[in-house]
């Protein structure tokens, strides 16, 4: 039989073991709650980010040319460009001292960001005042993902509108109503629908001009020029003035101020 | 892990700088990097994902530099889980939507995957060598006599 001292020691050991087990359980429970909370929070953040990313990049489908949204876009574009001289894909006074050449792809979402952002400010301010002219040139990038068989037809469609001095109306409208670059939304009927939205455009002449091999060769010439200059991204913005040519801006400029600064440096 | 986080931070910094400077990324796979970085998934609600990556790596590195406690390891786990989850989604987009792989983005995705696995391992093994910030019960042996539970009389 164990002595009283041994019994007390055994009881103490049991008590210590129980305390240790309780502390361990409390720690496990606390850890489980913390881990669950953090993992749940992380999952919520990721799911929210994916949801924003999935819907934020572009329209799932482009608006129908007869829709209210399309009519609003056409009105916005007409207001932006009203009274500004156009010739082919050049917008602005021929005597403007500074030329901003934009290499773009009509289905490129970053080009859309540029068109609806700092380029619109550039048009409203510097192009309208006669200080700057913008030349749009073709460079295939996003069309490779969307539907590369429609790259040349879409660029020719803009140039065919340019034959009626409405090329920039077509370009701007395309960007305003741009669809999801991963879908093959650009078709001949889509291009026709855009043309139908431009006030003052002769549809029959535009259709006829679209068959012009000269316009298709202009698109090829733009691509060749871009390759020769080492440009392979859209938009690539080249600013040339009386003094010099600024370092090309690749992608959407961070702000209108960046464009202004580059224009000032070459003026 | 700190070395990996620093490498990831460098990659994200590079991508952020070239985005805002309007420069072309150095890319061995032709136009793949540019195609990815000018796609609609290169921004999250207008914020470049490169900048989000930069902020994420700063957070991960910060959590790794904190005193080694259960809470800091859990913070690392949470941050790397977010990074791993979102970079997995972006890699999916590269493969199945953009059909181009940007090597900078892919390297960041690999770094985040390794960091996440390491963070899991580090957190799972936390009880072996790291105590939580505030132990729930101080060691009994060092407890002052006054706080000890009263000794029970009779048989225990």
Image (cartoon, rainbow, N blue to C red):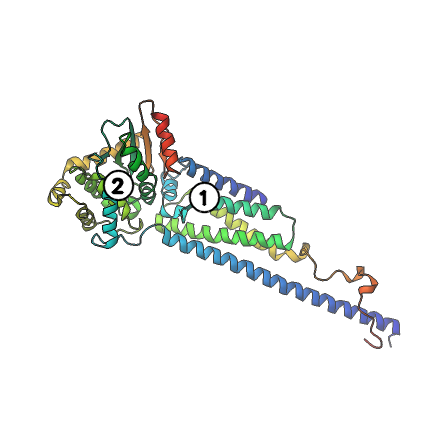
Q: Which mark is residue A74?
A: none
Quadrant of the image occupied by residue A36: bottom right
Are dots 2 and 1 in contact, CB under 8 Å?
A: no
Q: Nearer the viewer, residue A116 or B66?
A: A116
Q: Nearer the viewer, residue B67 or A24?
A: B67
Q: x, y (%) of residue A174?
A: 25, 45
Q: x, y (%) of residue B9?
A: 52, 42
Q: Residue at x 20, y 39 (%)?
A: A167
Q: Which residue is mark 1?
A: B50
Of badges 2 and 1, the one in the foreground is 2
The local crowd at label 1, few if under 14, some if 14 to 19, many if 20 or more residues have their Cα within 10 Å, is many
Q: How many labels, in total?
A: 2
Q: Nearer the viewer, residue B125 or A115?
A: A115
The chain identifier of the residue carrying mark 2 reads A
Q: Which residue is mark 2?
A: A80
Asked if residue B118 lies left or right of residue A147, the reply is: right
Q: Quadrant of the C terminus of chain A?
A: top left
Quadrant of the image occupied by residue A254: top left
The Cα–Cα distance between marks 2 and 1, rounded to whole angstroms, is: 33 Å
Give the vertical position of B63 relative to A93 (above or below). Answer: below
Q: Label 1's element? A: helix
Give the vertical position of A166 relative to A225 (above or below). Answer: below
Asked if residue A234 can be seen in this view, the reply is no
Q: Label 2's element? A: helix
């Amino acid at each position: 039989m164990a002595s009283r001292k041994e019994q007390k020691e055994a009881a103490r050991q049991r008590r210590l073991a129980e305390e240790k087990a309780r502390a361990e359980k409390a720690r496990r429970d606390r850890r489980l709650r913390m881990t669950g909370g953090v993992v749940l929070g992380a999952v919520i953040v990721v799911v929210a980010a994916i949801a924003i990313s999935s819907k934020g990049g572009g329209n799932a489908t482009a608006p129908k040319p007869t829709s209210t949204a399309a009519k609003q876009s056409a009105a916005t574009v007409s207001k932006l460009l009203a009274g500004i001289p156009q010739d082919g894909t050049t917008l602005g006074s021929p005597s403007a001292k500074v030329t901003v050449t934009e290499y773009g792809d009509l289905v490129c979402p970053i080009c859309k960001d540029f068109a609806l952002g700092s380029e619109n400010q550039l048009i409203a301010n510097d192009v309208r005042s006669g200080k700057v002219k913008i030349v749009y040139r073709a460079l295939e990038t996003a069309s490779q993902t969307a539907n590369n068989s429609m790259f040349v037809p879409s660029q020719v469609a803009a140039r065919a509108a340019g034959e009626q001095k409405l090329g920039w109306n077509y370009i701007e409208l395309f960007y305003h109503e741009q669809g999801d670059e991963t879908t093959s939304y650009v078709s001949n009927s889509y291009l026709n629908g855009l043309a139908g939205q431009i006030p003052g455009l002769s549809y029959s002449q535009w259709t006829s001009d679209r068959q012009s091999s000269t316009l298709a060769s202009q698109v090829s010439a733009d691509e060749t020029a871009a390759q020769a200059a080492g440009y392979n991204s859209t938009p690539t913005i080249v600013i040339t003035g009386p003094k010099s040519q600024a370092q090309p801006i690749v992608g959407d400029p961070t702000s209108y101020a960046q464009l202004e600064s580059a224009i000032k440096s070459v003026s | 892990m700190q070395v990996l986080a620093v490498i990831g931070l460098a990659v994200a910094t590079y991508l952020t700088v070239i985005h805002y400077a309007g420069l072309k990324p150095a890319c061995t796979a032709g136009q793949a990097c540019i195609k990815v970085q000018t796609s609609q998934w290169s921004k999250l609600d207008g914020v470049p994902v490169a900048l989000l990556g930069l902020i994420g790596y700063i957070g991960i590195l910060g959590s790794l530099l904190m005193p080694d406690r259960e809470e800091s390891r859990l913070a690392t786990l949470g941050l790397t889980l977010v990074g791993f989850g979102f970079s997995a989604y972006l890699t999916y987009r590269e493969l199945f939507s953009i059909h181009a792989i940007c090597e900078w983005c892919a390297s960041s995705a690999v770094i985040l995957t390794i960091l996440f696995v390491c963070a899991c391992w580090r957190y799972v093994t936390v009880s072996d060598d790291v105590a939580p910030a505030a132990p729930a019960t101080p060691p009994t042996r060092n407890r002052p006599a006054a706080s000890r539970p009263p000794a029970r009389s009779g048989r225990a």
